[in-house]
Amino acid sequence: QVQLVESGGGLVQAGGSLRLSCAASGRTSSIRAMGWFRQAPGKEREFVTSISSSGSSTYYADSVKGRFTVSRDNAKNTVYLQMDTLKPDDTAVYYCTVSPLYTGPTSLASAYYYWGQGTSVIISS
């Protein structure tokens, strides 16, 4: 089992920045790719970004490309999401997730097995 705990969410004005963190514990040796998804009110969960097991490859949804940056520190078993130039459309609950199978970044929700409880991000206009 892997436990994931997100932090860093909050309320910011449009154009501002936030940095989310997700710390993994438990059977961390099984972690390969890591990712972030989000779910806005009344909408389905959607892919945001993913990072390979080594951290050398990343993949972003078009909606966040150029504004969001994913990174990871394998020594700390932590993945980060730096979010800049935030828009009201970025308002959502953000979920951290890890894949025990995929080493490369992927947007497939089915590739991920463990999920965090989510952290709320609210962007005011």
Image (cartoon, rainbow, N blue to C red):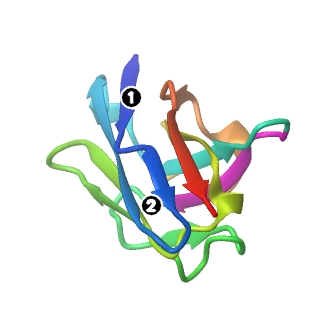
Q: Is residue 122 above or below residue 16?
A: above
Which quadrant would the N terminus be assigned to in this image? Answer: top left
- Side (left or right) of 100 relative to 7: right
Magenta-colored stretch includes residue 48: yes
Residue 18: x, y in percent?
39, 59
Q: Which residue is most to the bottom?
A: 66
Magenta-colored stretch includes residue 52: no
What amino acid does circle 2 point to?
Ser
What amino acid does circle 1 point to?
Leu
Q: Which residue is most to the top?
A: 1
Packing grade of label 2 (10 A; few <14, some 14-19, many >=20) is many
Q: Which residue position is annotated with label 1?
A: 4
Which quadrant would the C terminus be assigned to in this image? Answer: bottom right
Instruction: Find the magenta span and give its range.
Output: 43-50
Looking at the image, is mark 1 or mark 2 earlier in the sequence?
Answer: 1
Residue at figure coordinates x 52%, y 31% from the top left: 118
The secondary structure type at the circle numbered 1 is strand
Residue 45: x, y in percent?
75, 41
Residue at figure coordinates x 50%, y 24% from the top left: 117
Of residue 38 and residue 104, the one placed in the foreground of this image is 38
Residue at figure coordinates x 56%, y 48% from the top left: 122
